[in-house]
Image (cartoon, rainbow, N blue to C red):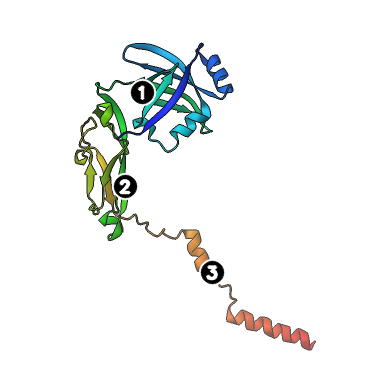
């Protein structure tokens, strides 16, 4: 089942970049809520409370019980904007949902198990797809989808069509690969370059035997003189 998060927001009287900066300066996060024909409504949430509530949560598939002025509605987080350098949340989009209406959302795919091709064949597990889009009633939203890769050998894959998500219709193409086991990567030894080859075989500088003997004789003559 989906994770449930409870948050409280207040209405924001002003919109625009300047108003958003002022909201952040007050240690709050600007947000909006929309859906079901309601006009987009600007909100603000306490920044620290929001960060703590979303810590360790798969926010894309979590149901948020959002309370505004004493009224609580069920929502999904459609988008979170973060600072490009710091982990700060800059803006959040909430989408109101109703219990009797199906919603479309993306849920994360988690692989479990150690593949046969990794344990006994030296292969490498490659997870290609990390989330899938589904259509489902709010009460059946899963927080994640788990796929067992234990039986995978080298060269074999699992696809979206192999997933089983109760009470949900999978919208992502069934041909899309979820995970595969590939052969171990091997790197050929680099060919030695010409410079390396020259260093490997140093030149031995040696004078001809006759020239060396002549120099020795001259040295002896100079010593005798």
Label 2 to label 3, Cα distance in Å? 47 Å
User: Residue 93 lies in what quarter of the image?
Assistant: top left
Spot occupied by residue 197 in the image (x, y as percentages of width and height): 48, 63
Q: Is residue 51 above or below residue 222?
A: above
Label 1 to label 3, Cα distance in Å? 75 Å
Q: Are marks 2 and 1 in contact (CB under 8 Å)?
A: no
Q: Residue at x 26, y 56 (%)?
A: 117
Q: Which residue is mark 1?
A: 75
Q: Is residue 39 above or below residue 223?
A: above
Q: Residue at x 24, y 37 (%)?
A: 176
Which residue is situated farthest in the front direction here? Answer: 70
Q: Residue at x 20, y 41 (%)?
A: 162
Q: Which residue is mark 2?
A: 126
Q: Are marks 2 and 3 in contact (CB under 8 Å)?
A: no
In this rendering, the count of numbered labels is 3
Label 2 to label 1, Cα distance in Å? 34 Å
Q: Is residue 184 above or below residue 146?
A: below
| Picture disc at residue 202 | 3
Q: Secondary structure at mark 2?
A: strand
Spot occupied by residue 14 in the image (x, y as percentages of width and height): 51, 11
């Amino acid at each position: 089942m989906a994770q449930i998060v409870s948050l409280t927001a207040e209405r924001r009287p002003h919109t625009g970049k300047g108003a958003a900066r002022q909201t952040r300066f007050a240690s709050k996060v600007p947000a909006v809520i929309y859906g079901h024909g309601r006009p987009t409504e600007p909100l603000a949430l306490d920044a620290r409370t929001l960060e703590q509530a979303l810590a360790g949560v798969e926010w894309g598939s979590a149901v948020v019980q959002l309370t505004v002025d004493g009224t609580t509605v069920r929502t999904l987080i459609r988008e979170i904007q973060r600072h490009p350098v710091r982990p700060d949340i800059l803006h959040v989009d909430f989408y109101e949902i109703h219990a009797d209406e199906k919603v479309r959302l993306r849920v994360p795919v988690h692989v479990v198990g150690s593949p046969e091709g990794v344990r006994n064949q030296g292969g490498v597990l490659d997870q290609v797809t990390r989330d899938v889009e589904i259509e489902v009633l709010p009460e059946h939203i899963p927080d994640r989808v788990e796929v067992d890769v234990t039986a995978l050998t080298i060269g074999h894959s699992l696809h979206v069509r192999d997933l089983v998500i109760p009470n949900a219709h999978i919208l992502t193409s069934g041909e899309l690969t979820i995970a595969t086991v590939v052969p171990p990567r091997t790197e050929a030894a680099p060919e030695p370059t010409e410079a390396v080859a020259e260093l490997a075989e140093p030149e031995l500088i040696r004078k001809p035997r006759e020239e060396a003997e002549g120099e020795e004789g001259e040295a002896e003559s100079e010593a005798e003189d």
